[in-house]
């Protein structure tokens, strides 16, 4: 208790225009609970790496009051603002940022995040759209030498693991495909088809042996005798002499011209007129024909009316499997008991149980656990058929009775669900142990409901 108190006392707060700002000057000072109590945050002078880390912590939260929190920074020499700060302050006059924060806070209240999309892609897209809505701004790319694709997108960048830049573009494309966003094309990028990086070195190579050791030489055309050859063959000291007719070539345009160039390869001595174009990936070392590179569009994104509607009203209507409801635990037990009685030596029903690791659930408050439970059910629902039965005991335990499934089919389904649950949880947390454990067994007459649930 004493320790907590001491910790809190070290925090710095600023009041302006009736709003309370928390000033953070290191990653270690961050606590979600502290952030919830204040209206906005100001990041003090920090290494860029720390800033990125802090923004990740805040924006990866599931709570809109946290991930949409207005975040300002002390004056920094960062005109591009690739972090997506809401503004900058000298910490002396904070009126400007207070006014900005007030506007954002009012709009955060309008965001309906009660029905959170369950898969990572849509959840990320929703957060990005909510960010754009509350800031009333477009999402524009910022050139960034350290981005794997050469462009950074503020906010959404913090939601992804480093280097997942193409994932980012695909998520935004999802918004576009669903009519939630509109775009304006800014650039087209070409990325390595192996590692998706765009730090590429383009070079001309020999079409026969792919060597970069090629030289271009002018072709000379002697008008008088119509002889054509590379310039080397005409070279005679400082002068040009035709190797066929021995005349001196004096004036370009009158005696001769240079109709084209010819390449020759110093490795295989091949002579050719058109070199091949190759891209060498600095990141993974792959050499690739430029025609095989991946092309992606870099756009500026705006929320469409449909997108705004979704931010304000939630994603509810978009849910495909919303009609599948889960059963109360009591009812599930009754149904499972019936299924057990019905089955002889073997049946076409499989009982599946998912356990979520305690470390995931226990830090969440009561409300957080309920929301978490809804989210997990939502994901599981999307993988089971309408005839399957689903229930949950608490935020940690989930049960499914898969009807008309072989053990192999059930196993496959179970693995997919386990993978997706882990992905969702791991994307939001830093630890990566066995966070989700799925187990399954064929329903047979010797099973006991009370042992299973
Ligand atoms: Zn590569
Ligand atoms: Zn000649
Ligand atoms: Zn060659």
Image (spheres, rainbow, N blue to C red):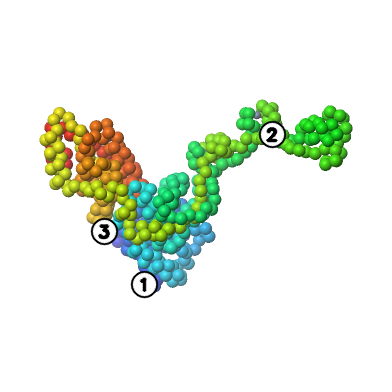
Q: Position of residue 107 (x, y in %)?
A: 37, 64
231 on left or right of 45: right
Asked if disc 3 and disc 1 are in contact, CB closer than 8 Å, the reply is: no
| Residue at x 54%, y 46% (from the top left corner) | 189
| Residue at x 25%, y 56% (from the top left corner) | 367
Label 3 beta carbon within 8 A of ligand 1:
no
Q: Position of residue 395 (x, y in %)?
A: 23, 48
Query: Disc 3 designates what residue?
Result: 1
For numbered disc 1, what is the local secondary structure?
A: loop
Quarter of the image that includes the N terminus? bottom left
The Cα–Cα distance between marks 3 and 1, rounded to whole angstroms, is 29 Å
Say whether residue 360 is visible: no
Quarter of the image that includes the C terminus? top left
Query: Disc 2 designates what residue?
Result: 273
Label 1: how many Cα within 10 Å (few below 14, some 14–19, many 20+): few
Taking depth in this image into account, of 357 and 116 the one nearest to the observer is: 116
77 on left or right of 397: right
Say whether residue 201 is visible: yes
Query: Disc 1 designates what residue?
Result: 18
Q: Point out the residue furthest to the right here.
A: 247
250 on left or right of 433: right
The numbered mark, 2 or 1, whose residue comes first in the sequence reads 1
| Residue at x 21%, y 37% (from the top left corner) | 403
- Which label number is shown at residue 363? none
Taking depth in this image into account, of 427 and 196 the one nearest to the observer is: 196
116 on left or right of 225: left
Label 2: how many Cα within 10 Å (few below 14, some 14–19, many 20+): few
Comparing marks 3 and 1, which lies closer to the viewer? 1
The numbered mark, 3 or 1, whose residue comes first in the sequence reads 3
The Cα–Cα distance between marks 2 and 1, rounded to whole angstroms, is 73 Å
Q: Point out the residue furthest to the top here.
A: 268
């Amino acid at each position: 208790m004493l320790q907590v108190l001491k910790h809190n006392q070290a925090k710095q707060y600023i009041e302006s225009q009736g709003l309370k700002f928390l000033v953070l000057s290191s990653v270690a000072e961050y606590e979600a609970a502290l952030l919830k109590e204040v209206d906005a945050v100001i990041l003090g002078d920090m290494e860029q790496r720390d800033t990125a880390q802090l923004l990740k912590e805040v924006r990866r939260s599931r709570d809109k009051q946290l991930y949409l929190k207005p975040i300002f920074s002390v004056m920094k020499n960062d005109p591009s603002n690739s972090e997506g700060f809401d503004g900058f302050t000298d910490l002396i006059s904070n009126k400007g940022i207070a006014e900005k924060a007030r506007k954002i806070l009012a709009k955060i209240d309008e965001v309906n995040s009660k029905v959170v999309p369950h898969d990572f892609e849509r959840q990320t897209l929703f957060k990005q759209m909510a960010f754009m809505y509350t800031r009333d701004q477009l999402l524009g790319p910022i050139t960034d030498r350290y981005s794997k694709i050469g462009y950074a997108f503020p906010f959404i960048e913090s939601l992804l693991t480093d280097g997942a830049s193409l994932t980012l573009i695909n998520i935004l494309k999802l918004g576009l495909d669903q009519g939630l966003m509109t775009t304006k094309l800014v650039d087209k990028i070409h990325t390595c088809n192996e590692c998706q990086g765009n730090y590429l070195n383009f070079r001309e190579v020999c079409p026969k042996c792919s060597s970069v050791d090629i030289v271009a030489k002018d072709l000379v055309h002697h008008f008088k005798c119509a002889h054509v050859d590379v310039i080397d063959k005409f070279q005679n000291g400082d002068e040009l002499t035709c190797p066929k007719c021995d005349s001196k070539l004096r004036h370009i345009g009158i005696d001769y011209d240079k109709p084209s160039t010819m390449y020759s390869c110093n490795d295989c001595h091949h002579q050719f007129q058109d070199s091949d174009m190759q891209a060498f990936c600095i990141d993974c070392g792959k050499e690739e024909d430029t025609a095989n590179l991946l092309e992606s569009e870099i756009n500026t994104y705006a929320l469409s009316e449909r997108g705004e509607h979704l931010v304000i009203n939630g994603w509810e209507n978009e849910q495909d499997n919303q009609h599948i409801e889960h059963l109360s635990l009591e009812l599930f037990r009754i149904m499972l008991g019936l299924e057990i009685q019905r089955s002889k030596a073997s049946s076409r029903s499989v009982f599946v149980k998912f356990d979520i690791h305690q470390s995931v659930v226990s830090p969440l408050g009561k409300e957080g656990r309920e929301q978490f439970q809804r989210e997990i059910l939502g994901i599981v629902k999307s993988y089971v058929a309408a005839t399957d039965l689903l229930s949950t005991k608490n935020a940690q335990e989930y049960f499914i009775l898969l009807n008309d499934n072989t053990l192999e089919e059930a196993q496959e389904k179970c693995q997919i669900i386990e993978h997706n649950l882990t992905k969702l949880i791991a994307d939001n947390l830093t630890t990566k142990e066995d966070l989700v454990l799925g187990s399954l067994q064929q329903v047979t007459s010797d099973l006991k409901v009370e042992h299973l649930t």
